[in-house]
Structure formats: structure tokens, C-alpha cells
Image (cartoon, rainbow, N blue to C red):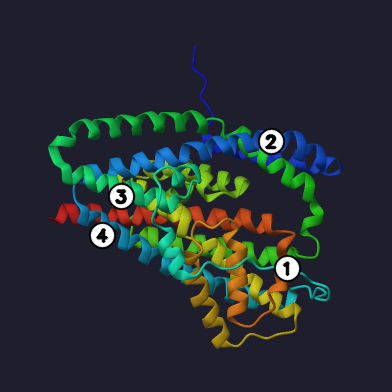
């Protein structure tokens, strides 16, 4: 008797995604029920993912550094990663501004009277630098502060290399713990279809088709820009710098793409993203460093959102932005993507900074705040595809370097 072929994870997540939309639309008049009794199961799944992310990042980075046995190689990977993230973020905000300007005539002009929005205080740049370095061994792990966890992993990994043969037992311990947490991650990822359904269904049930009402054109502009950036920028870089077919790249990335879209969490998508990228041939030593860093500081999708929302808010207030102001938005959004790294609600804080940089009223954020979750689903998806493309490219460059050596 022939053994039944199991559905791939991507197919399972896609089915869950479609079912979530259908059931959510059927439950639009029972939004509270969906929020109270379906969403908690999605939250449980997301909690499990968040629980496994810190040990996976900590031990996989340490394991990757130990296997490299060269501190300079880690530095080389780090520089390439940050340069790539900054360049793609600048491209993303440019695409966002260009796309929004094309759609500007179709944007609704909403009333700006009685608008209220209290912008969170942006963290000063030097404070952000200080906050990268942990002052306590436990706090970065309990707070899931990914930048601090990465710094911890780097310091401990470097120390193990410098101690040399006397740390053999520690090396074995780190590798075994890495295997254990990876297996634990596999177990949790198998629950993805259930998690996706329970996370997305309440969003559709609460918002319903009405969410596409007055802001339909703004959402459409943002999503077209998201697709253009992913299809053009990432396809070109993956093909030219990573030597990989864009079709194969996006096909293998489907499980991570669908999970990111339904959960709107870059850090939550990290374990699935790691699996997808390693299947595409990226080395674990590179992915274990590049992906956690990207989940924290790479915000291409968020940058597109800044561009579209800035033009929309300006048009609602009857303001036309000149070329100089657009250049200011590009620079501010690019630098803010690292300046707000790891801050909860970073998208809104970045948007407030961008609006202030060109003299637009911050209270305009209230115009888009109601549908922020819908924007967030798209921008998170773009962010994680960007992280994956960087892993492929850096891995390919490092491989060529080692062959040439």
C-alpha cells in the first residue's frame, strides 16, 4: 500500500490562512467571541515561538562563531550585513515615496480636525548605542532584547575561541544545547498552521471588509510598494550577489512569508525563516548571525510604510512635500531603522520621527493608526524577506572568499 504524501508546511499554512479569512469574514458580527476564544490559542503559539527564539539565537550564534574559529570573519560578516540592510532600507523608502506620489491623486482627504496622537519619545542615538550592551546576564534573555542577546553570544563565543583547547567540554556543551533547542523549535513549528489560523481569524473578524473602506487606496499603495520592493530589489540582489534564482528563493520562503503575514512578528518568524534560508543553501554560521540581527534592525517594510503614510498625511493637511523634504525622509527613515532597533511599536515611533523631520503634524498618525495592523502584516513580510536575502548574499560571498583563499 502506497504511503500517503504529507502536505508541505507551506501548503498547510496557506490552507490555514485561507480558512482564517473565510471564518473571520463569517464571524464579523461575532468579533468579540473571536478575540476572546480564538485569539488566545494564537497567543499561546506566539508565546511558544518567543520562548524558543532566545535560546536558539544565543546557542546558534555561539555555535556559529566557534565553528568559524576566527573573530575577524565575524566582523567581516557583520559589516556586510549592516551595509546591505542600510542600502535596501534606503531603496525601500524611495520606492514608498515614489509609489505614494503616483497614488496621491486617489488618496482620500480625511478630516484633520480634532485629531489627537501622542508620539512616544524617540530614544536618543547615544542611548541606543549604550542599550545594545547588556548590564546583566539574565535581563536580555528575560526581556527578549535580541540585540543584547546577540552581543552576549558574540562575547561568549569569542571567549571560547580565545580559551582554545581548554574549553573543549564547553564547545561540546554549546553544540549539544544548540541541537536540543533546534529540535524543540521543530516541534513548535509543526503547530504553525493552527497558530496562523488563530492569529489571523480574529483580525479579520474584528475589522471585516469595513477596514478596506476609507483607507483602501492608502493600503493598496503600500502593498503595491511592498510587492515591487520584494520582486525587484530582492530578486536582483539574490540573483546578482547570491547567485540564486529568485523563483526558487520565493518558493522556498513561502512558509516564512505566510507566517510573517499572519503573525505580524519578525522575531516570531525567526525560527521558520532560519529553516527556509538553510534549505536554500545558506550556511548556518551566517544565518545564525544575520537573521537575528535583521529581525531587530532591518526595517525595509517599515520604511515603505513611512513613505506612503508621510505623503498621505501631508495630502490630508493640504501640504505638498518638495524634493528636499523627500530626501530628508529617506535619510531619517534609514537612520531611524537602526536608531529604533528593538523598541516595541518601532513603526509608529519611526513614523513620528519622519513626520517631525519634515515639519508634518504628528497627530496625523491618528489617521492611519486604526488600520496599523493591516499595514504591519505587509511590512513584517517584507522585513523578513529582506533578512533572508541578506543571509543568502552574505553566505554566497563568504563561500566564494573561502574557495579563493
Q: Position of residue 105 (x, y in %)?
A: 73, 78
Q: Position of residue 72 (x, y in %)?
A: 20, 57
Distance between the alpha carbons at the discs numbered 1 and 2? 29 Å
Q: Nearer the viewer, mark 1 or mark 2?
A: 1
10 Å crowding of disc 2: few (<14), some (14-19), many (20+): some
Sequence order check: which comes first, mark 1 or mark 2? 2
Sequence order check: which comes first, mark 2 or mark 3? 2
Q: Quadrant of residue 78?
A: bottom left
Q: Which residue is mark 3?
A: 154
Q: Quadrant of residue 279?
A: top left
Distance between the alpha carbons at the discs numbered 2 and 4? 43 Å
Identified at 43% across, 48% down, the residue is 248
Question: Is 77 left, or right, of 366 in this rendering?
Answer: left
Q: Position of residue 6 (x, y in %)?
A: 52, 26
Q: Nearer the viewer, residue 142 or 202?
A: 142
Q: Quadrant of residue 218?
A: bottom right
Mark 4 residue element: helix
Q: Which residue is mark 4?
A: 76
Distance between the alpha carbons at the discs numbered 4 and 3? 14 Å
Sequence order check: which comes first, mark 2 or mark 4? 2
Amino acid at each position: 500500500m502506497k504511503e500517503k504524501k504529507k502536505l508541505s508546511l507551506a501548503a498547510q499554512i496557506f490552507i490555514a490562512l485561507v480558512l482564517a479569512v473565510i471564518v473571520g469574514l463569517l464571524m464579523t458580527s461575532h468579533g468579540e467571541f473571536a478575540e476572546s476564544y480564538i485569539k488566545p490559542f494564537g497567543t499561546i503559539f506566539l508565546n511558544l515561538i518567543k520562548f524558543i527564539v532566545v535560546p536558539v539565537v544565543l546557542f546558534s550564534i555561539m555555535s556559529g562563531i566557534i565553528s568559524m574559529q576566527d573573530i575577524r570573519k565575524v566582523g567581516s560578516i557583520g559589516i556586510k550585513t549592516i551595509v546591505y540592510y542600510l542600502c535596501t532600507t534606503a531603496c525601500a523608502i524611495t520606492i514608498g515615496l515614489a509609489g505614494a506620489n503616483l497614488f496621491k491623486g486617489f488618496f482620500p482627504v480625511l478630516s484633520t480636525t480634532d485629531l489627537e496622537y501622542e508620539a512616544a519619545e524617540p530614544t536618543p542615538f547615544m542611548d541606543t548605542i549604550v542599550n545594545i550592551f547588556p548590564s546583566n546576564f539574565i535581563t536580555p534573555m528575560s526581556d527578549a532584547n535580541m540585540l543584547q542577546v546577540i552581543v552576549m553570544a558574540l562575547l561568549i563565543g569569542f571567549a571560547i575561541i580565545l580559551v582554545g583547547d581548554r574549553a573543549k567540554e564547553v564547545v561540546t556543551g554549546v553544540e549539544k544545547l544548540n541541537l536540543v533547542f533546534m529540535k524543540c523549535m521543530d516541534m513548535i513549528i509543526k503547530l504553525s498552521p493552527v497558530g496562523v489560523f488563530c492569529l489571523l481569524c480574529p483580525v479579520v473578524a474584528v475589522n471585516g471588509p469595513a477596514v478596506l473602506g476609507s483607507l483602501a487606496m492608502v493600503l493598496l499603495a503600500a502593498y503595491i510598494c511592498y510587492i515591487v520592493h520584494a520582486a525587484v530589489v530582492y530578486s536582483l540582489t539574490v540573483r546578482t550577489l547570491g547567485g540564486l534564482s529568485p523563483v526558487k528563493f520565493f518558493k522556498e520562503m513561502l512558509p516564512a512569508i505566510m507566517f510573517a503575514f499572519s503573525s505580524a512578528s519578525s522575531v516570531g518568524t525567526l525560527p521558520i525563516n532560519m529553516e527556509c534560508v538553510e534549505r536554500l543553501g545558506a550556511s548556518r554560521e551566517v544565518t545564525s548571525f544575520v537573521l537575528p540581527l535583521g529581525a531587530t534592525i532591518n526595517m525595509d517594510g517599515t520604511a515603505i510604510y513611512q513613505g506612503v503614510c508621510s505623503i498621505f498625511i501631508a495630502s490630508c493637511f493640504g501640504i505638498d512635500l518638495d524634493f528636499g523634504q523627500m530626501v530628508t525622509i529617506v535619510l531619517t527613515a534609514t537612520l531611524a531603522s537602526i536608531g529604533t532597533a528593538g523598541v516595541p511599536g518601532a513603526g509608529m515611533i519611526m513614523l513620528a520621527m519622519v513626520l517631525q523631520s519634515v515639519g508634518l503634524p504628528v497627530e496625523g498618525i491618528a489617521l492611519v493608526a486604526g488600520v496599523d495592523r493591516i499595514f504591519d502584516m505587509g511590512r513584517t513580510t517584507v522585513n523578513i524577506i529582506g533578512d533572508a536575502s541578506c543571509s543568502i548574499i552574505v553566505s554566497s560571498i563568504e563561500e566564494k572568499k573561502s574557495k579563493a583563499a
